């Protein structure tokens, strides 16, 4: 059940779109962890940089998206910049569409 709820929360977070990059926060690699205990969801995520003006928007969007998932009684989102986000965290298909060159 816990793994299923984590999966549903992860899917729900895909509606949160980074306004700068135009892709969802899951595929961009912003979501570091989703933990569930007795319906309480704790999400640890990041943004491109600590000074990113969309940080509050992304955090609030993630909290709203997670809260809307059936079975979630509470959602808490913690922003962290450790480790720092890098383009290496982007899903490969999204990375290509954003124009990040593959480095071998």
Image (tube, rainbow, N blue to C red):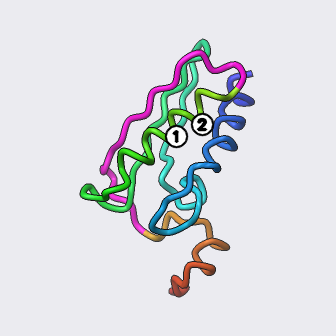
Q: For mark 2, does the 10 Å Cα neighbourhood hold few (<14), some (14 to 19), or many (20 or more) residues?
A: some
Up the image or down, 62 lies above or below 20; here it is above
Q: For mark 1, does the 10 Å Cα neighbourhood hold few (<14), some (14 to 19), or many (20 or more) residues?
A: many
The answer to which image quadrant residue 4 occupies is top right
Q: Main secondary structure of the magenta part?
A: loop
Residue 15 position in % (x across, y down): 64, 49
In the displayed orientation, state which residue is furthest to the top.
Answer: 38
Residue 93 position in % (x across, y down): 67, 73
Residue 2 position in % (x across, y down): 68, 23
**Magenta region includes residue 76:** yes
The boundaries of the magenta stretch are 70-86
Residue in the image at 24% along x and 58% along y: 51
Residue in the image at 45% along x and 70% along y: 87
Closer to the camera in the image, 46 or 59: 59
Q: Quadrant of the N terminus?
A: top right
Residue in the image at 30% along x and 49% along y: 82
The answer to which image quadrant residue 47 occupies is bottom left
How far, Cα to Cα, is label 1 from label 2? 5 Å
Q: Are marks 1 and 2 in contact (CB under 8 Å)?
A: yes
Up the image or down, 67 lies above or below 65; here it is above
Residue in the image at 63% along x and 21% along y: 72
**Magenta region includes residue 85:** yes
Residue identified by numbered label 2: 65
Instruction: Tell me the element at label 2.
Output: helix
Up the image or down, 44 lies above or below 53; here it is above
Residue identified by numbered label 1: 62
Instruction: Tell me the element at label 1.
Output: helix
């Amino acid at each position: 059940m816990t793994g299923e709820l984590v999966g549903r929360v992860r899917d729900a977070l895909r509606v949160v779109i980074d306004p700068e990059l135009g892709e969802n926060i899951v595929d961009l690699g912003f979501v570091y962890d989703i933990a569930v205990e007795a319906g309480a969801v704790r999400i640890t995520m990041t943004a491109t940089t600590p000074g990113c003006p969309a940080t509050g928007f992304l955090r609030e969007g993630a909290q709203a998206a997670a809260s809307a998932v059936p079975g979630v009684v509470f959602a808490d989102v913690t922003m962290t910049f450790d480790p720092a986000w890098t383009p290496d965290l982007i899903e490969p298909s999204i990375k290509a569409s954003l124009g990040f060159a593959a480095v071998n």
